[in-house]
Amino acid sequence: MQADEAWPAVVEAFAHYGKKVVPKLRSERRKLVEQLLVEFEPEELVAAVHGYVRYHEGLDQKDDFNPRKFFNPESVFRLGKMEQRVELGLEGPWSRPLTHEEQVKARQEAARERVARAREAMEAKRLRAL
């Protein structure tokens, strides 16, 4: 029963990256998950999913390798790489680094917000003086 309890979180982790995984455990995957749960905690299975994506720096194709092609429970939960993936995934979900343009826009937006707050404070101060 522990495999059935751990599986929804794993399905949600795959969905976070746009991968649909059958929400009900079938016999082959059930055996795999039960075998993993002997050694790993349910949270570590979720971390392994995030670790796979973090290791490949996303799921976009790079040169001759497409990580999305192998983004399924059988590949992600291979015993030989589980330790590394869990360790990488403990940092949380992977997100693409901001481009230079996105960084500039974020800084400009933060500056606009600071200016707006300063104007509001000055207006409140002016109204109190009257």
Image (cartoon, grey):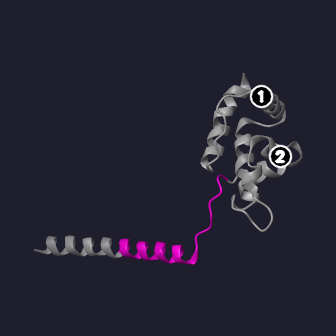
Q: Position of residue 64 (x, y in %)?
A: 80, 65
Q: Which residue is mark 1?
A: 30
Please determine whether, in this image, residue 96 is positioned above or below residue 85: below
Indicate the amino acid at tag 2. Met
Instruction: Please tell me which residue is depicted at 62% across the width and 60% down the height of the picture.
Output: 95
Side of 105 where 45 appears, left or right: right
Q: Are marks 1 and 2 in contact (CB under 8 Å)?
A: no
Q: Earlier in the sequence, mark 1 or mark 2?
A: 1
Q: CA distance from mark 1 to mark 2?
A: 17 Å
Q: Position of residue 88 (x, y in %)?
A: 75, 54
Question: The C terminus lies in which quarter of the figure?
Answer: bottom left
Instruction: Please tell me which residue is depicted at 69% across the width and 54% down the height of the picture.
Output: 91
Residue range of the region highlighted in magenta in the rendering = 92-114
Tally of numbered discs:
2
Task: Verify whether residue 103 appears in magenta.
Answer: yes
Q: Which residue is mark 2?
A: 82
Indicate the amino acid at tag 1. Arg
Instruction: Please tell me which residue is depicted at 25% across the width and 71% down the height of the picture.
Output: 120
Please determine whether, in this image, residue 55 is positioned above or below residue 71: below
Instruction: Please tell me which residue is depicted at 82% across the width and 33% down the height of the picture.
Output: 32
